[in-house]
Structures are given as C-alpha cells and as structure tokens.
Amino acid sequence: LLSFHLGVLVPNEKPLVGGVREGSPAYKAGLKEGDLIISIDGKKISTWEEMTNIIRGHTSDTPQIIEWMRGDKIFSAEVVSIKEKVLDGWTMKKAKVIGIINASTLQKVNIFDSIKDGFARVGYFTRLVFVSVKMIITGEESVKSIGGPIIIAKLAGESAKSGIWNLLAFMAFLSLNLGFLNILPIPVLDGGHLIFISIEGIARKPLPAKFKSIVQQIGMAFL
C-alpha cells in the first residue's frame, strides 16, 4: 500500500549528492545537496557505485581529495572518511563513509511492482531487526537501545504529526518488529509455544503442566 501510494525510490546512477548528514566529514568539507562528485584523488568518477567502492576501499586514515561540481564551479577538499555500521545481508559490517546519500527519485509503480517492492522492504527490515537483536544478545549493542511503550508512543506521535503515510510506515515497521520477536523460541511467546508443541509431538505425550509453568515464568522474567 505504501509503495503503491508513495512510489518506489529509484537511486540516481550518477554520483549526485541527495543529502549531507550534519556533522559528517562531507558536511565539514562543504559538500551540499545537488553537488556532483567528479573525482577522488585524481581518479575520475562517473557513477555512485564507483565513488562508494573507492571510499570503502580506502584502507588508511589519510584524507582523500574529493572534487565536486556545483553549477558551473568546481570545488575540492580533503575528506577523512569514518567507519560506520551498515547492513550487509544478515550481518552488520563496518564500512567507510563520508556522510552523504544518493539523490534518489520517487517513481510511481503499478500494483504488481508495488507488491514486489513491499516484499523487498519487509525482507530488508526483517534482516535489520534480526541483526539488531543478535547484536543486543552478543553485547555489540547496548540494551539501552531497546525502546519501551513510552518511546513507541512518542515515535508514533511524531509520525502522526508528519502525516498519515508516515504513521502507516511506522506501524508497518513496528508490526515487523513484534512479529519477529514473537517467533523467537522464548517461553510465553508463540515461538516458545511452538517449541513445547514440537517436543510433545516428538514425545507423543504432553509435558507436565508444572514444568511448563516454571519455564514460562523464567521466560517472562527474561522478557
């Protein structure tokens, strides 16, 4: 529904800056939205992918000389890239970035393409939730990053203020979070019940009610 109404983001193949994060290396260097990056360390750039590969492939902490065009003027500056966590498949990896986003455009699509894009978004956010939970369990991410009912209500309120479609997008993301967490093999959740059912199916007899009650209390304490 969101893809059909709002359209699908189509990235620009050119190294055209669509936005600059405040405080990032690109921001400090003076890059602005609409700038076209034309070279890095003297090497001509023609696509966004080329630019990304050069920045991420820079192994040292030395600055790179980035040259860009704004209107009919050419600017250049030394930029020191920083490492940030980016989602790569089912893992979170550190990659070098300078703090810019691609100048993507919203393109209207038919119902079939919107369904395809909807599934792609579900896949991406499911991977994001999986990786986030894994990082919290392994200690890579702080437990403080988990939001409770108050934070959810706050975010829902902010989404509602910016329009019904932003609220629907937040609801969809929240539903994915809850759906994923609910199938984890933790007692009291549906995933835990599935474990009980599987054990009873293999043993061909019900588990003792007292045992199930104790395990569920432990699961509740864990949650």
Image (spheres, grey):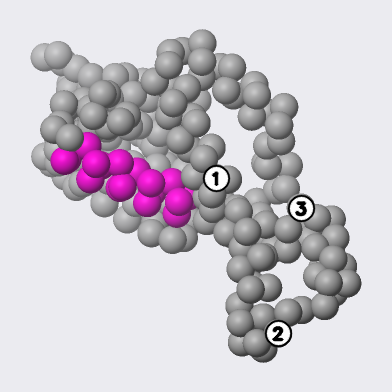
Left or right: where 26 falls relative to 173: left
- Element at label 3: loop
Q: Position of residue 157 (x, y in %)?
A: 59, 17
Q: Residue at x 83, y 72 (%)?
A: 209
Residue 41 occupies quadrant: top left
Question: Observer-nearest residue: 145 or 54?
Answer: 145
Q: Which residue is mark 1?
A: 177
Left or right: where 169 falls relative to 175: left
Question: Observer-nearest residue: 206 or 94?
Answer: 206
Q: Which residue is mark 2?
A: 205
| Residue stretch rendered in magenta on the structure | 112-128
Left or right: where 41 falls relative to 97: left
Question: Observer-nearest residue: 15 or 178?
Answer: 178
Q: Which residue is mark 3?
A: 223
- Element at label 2: loop
Q: Amino acid at mark 1?
A: Asn
Quarter of the image that includes the N terminus: top left
Label 1 to label 2: alpha-carbon separation? 33 Å
Q: Position of residue 160 (x, y in %)?
A: 51, 15
Q: Position of residue 203 (x, y in %)?
A: 67, 88
